[in-house]
Image (cartoon, rainbow, N blue to C red):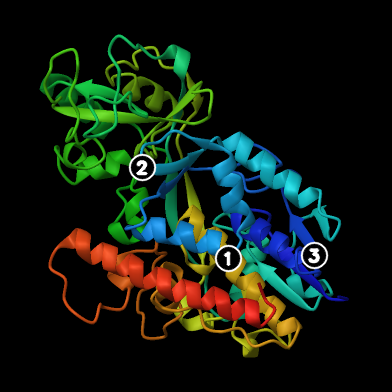
């Protein structure tokens, strides 16, 4: 097939899109600005580098996140396969060895003869000849490309602040204080380390957390921060006990040293298969590096913690999808001077690793179908990503903020199910059936 698609950004969405198109015989020019042009949070030159958590969220079939993973597998996602290949223990979640995952994706991308991988910052996508373009430049889109997007869309790009949690070295932790346990699984070894607070140590920690110096010296309003990535200090500002009923909730844990539930607890999740580094779960932060070292060492068991990576705050750029994107993830044609431009990943207003992967996959399928004059069936709104796509591209959606897949935006069930678990199971069963039909349709049309 003598067709070429330019893809800007080799993150989760861009890498998935490139692999999907190449597997269908489309030539891909994949352009990534790193490492020639760096960002505040990336540390490698590899594809699909994870800069926040290493968790891809729940694997439970009766959860929206679990549904999305099943949908990715049904559609042949290359990156979800790479994630499973690099899985580390994390209870009911899919967490990955971040280095192993990125390394595997890089091997797949750079080893594909139909993918021309270029280290290059793109400031004007229209300057590159191609049959279609997918922009998947992510939340840290360069200023120059963001300016181009603003001019092209006729609107200013929206932005909010996203946050990443610190990572600490395992051999610097006090294992006499920490205990290994997953919630409600006292008899199992557990996939998380838990740092137990007493009331006194918790009170002292919160006091210092609130007083600590921040990088951005202002109190963020709710609209400025995506709710799932609120810095721990901003959560504490909502109330002294807010972390204890959220990120630091002790529910389902029993400290073997006391035989009782701790007053509060910080959970640490392994960053790699060797468990040499741990992520402070839910501890995204805007504190300065010296303050992180001082305050987070007040957490029991972390008194001598060595930080492999400090938490950071960064800008997250995304477009106003309900006004600018069609359900095929194509930018409004009247704004593109005859070019076919698709937006994928967090730039499109999806939030989450698996959501980014799926957006790249869907953008690739749409581009392929258009290039080969095939009709692509509509992704059912009963599926997890179909519901998100409907919501994100619905012009009636006002004040749009990046969104995860969730049951709240799915079409209601035909009959009311009062029991929450049964209701979620019904959503999942309905979505699975819809996805099966969709996949069968794609195969008949020669798209899958």
Q: Residue at position x 28%, y 29% from top?
A: 266
Is residue 225 shown above or below 203? below
Q: Residue sitting at 79 percent across and 55 percent down?
A: 120
| 295 horizontally vs 86: left or right | left
Residue 28: give its label: 3
Q: Tell me the quarter of the image containing the C terminus.
A: bottom right
Q: Position of residue 145 (x, y in %)?
A: 66, 64
Cα separation, mark 2 vs mark 1, equals 23 Å
**Crowding near the residue tagged with mark 2, few <14, some 14–19, many ≥20 C-alpha atoms within 10 Å:** few
Task: Kindly report the distance in space between the C-alpha atoms of the residues bearing marks 3 and 1.
Answer: 20 Å
Can residue 15 be seen here? The reply is: yes
Residue indicated by mark 2: 92
The spot of residue 283 in percent (x, y) is: 35, 36
> Does label 2 or label 3 sit earlier along the sequence?
3
> Rounded to the nearest whole Å, what is the CA distance between mark 2 and mark 3?
36 Å
- Residue ID for mark 1: 75
SS at badge 3: strand
């Amino acid at each position: 097939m003598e067709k070429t698609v330019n893809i800007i950004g080799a993150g989760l969405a861009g890498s998935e899109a490139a692999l999907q198109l190449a597997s269908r015989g489309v030539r891909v020019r994949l352009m990534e600005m790193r490492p020639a042009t760096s960002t505040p949070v990336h540390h490698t030159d590899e594809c699909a580098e994870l800069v926040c958590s290493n968790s891809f969220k729940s694997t439970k079939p009766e959860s929206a996140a679990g549904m999305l993973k099943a949908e990715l597998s049904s559609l042949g996602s290359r990156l979800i396969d790479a994630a499973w290949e690099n899985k580390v223990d994390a209870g009911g979640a899919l967490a990955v060895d971040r280095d192993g995952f990125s390394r595997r994706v890089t091997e797949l991308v750079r080893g594909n003869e139909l993918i021309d991988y270029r280290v290059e910052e793109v400031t004007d996508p229209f300057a590159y000849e191609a049959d279609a373009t997918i922009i998947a430049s992510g939340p840290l889109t360069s200023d120059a490309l963001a300016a181009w997007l603003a001019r092209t869309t006729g609107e200013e790009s929206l932005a909010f602040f996203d946050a990443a949690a610190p990572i600490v070295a395992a051999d610097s932790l006090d294992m006499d204080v920490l205990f290994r346990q997953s919630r409600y699984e006292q008899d199992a070894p557990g996939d998380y380390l838990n740092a137990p607070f007493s009331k006194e140590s918790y009170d002292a920690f919160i006091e210092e957390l609130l007083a600590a110096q921040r990088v951005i010296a202002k109190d963020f309003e709710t609209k400025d921060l995506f709710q799932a990535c609120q810095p721990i200090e901003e959560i504490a500002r909502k109330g002294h006990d807010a972390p204890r009923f959220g990120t630091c909730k002790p529910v389902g844990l029993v400290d073997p040293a006391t035989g009782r539930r701790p007053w509060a607890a910080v959970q640490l999740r392994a960053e790699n298969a060797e468990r040499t580094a741990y992520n402070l779960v839910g501890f995204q932060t805007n504190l300065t590096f010296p303050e992180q070292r001082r305050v987070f060492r007040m957490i029991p068991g972390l008194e001598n913690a060595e930080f492999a990576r400090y938490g950071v705050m960064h800008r997250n750029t995304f477009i106003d999808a309900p006004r600018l994107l069609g359900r095929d993830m194509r930018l409004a044609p009247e704004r593109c001077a005859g070019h076919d431009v698709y937006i994928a990943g967090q730039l499109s207003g999806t939030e989450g690793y698996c959501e980014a992967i799926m957006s790249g996959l869907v953008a690739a399928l749409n581009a392929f179908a258009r290039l080969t004059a095939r009709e692509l069936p509509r992704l059912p709104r009963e599926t997890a990503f179909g519901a998100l796509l409907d919501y994100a591209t619905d012009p009636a959606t006002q004040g749009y903020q990046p969104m995860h897949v969730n049951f709240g935006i799915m079409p209601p069930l035909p009959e009311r199910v009062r029991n929450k678990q049964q209701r979620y199971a019904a959503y999942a069963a309905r979505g699975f059936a819809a996805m099966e039909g969709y996949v069968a349709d794609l195969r008949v049309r020669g798209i899958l």
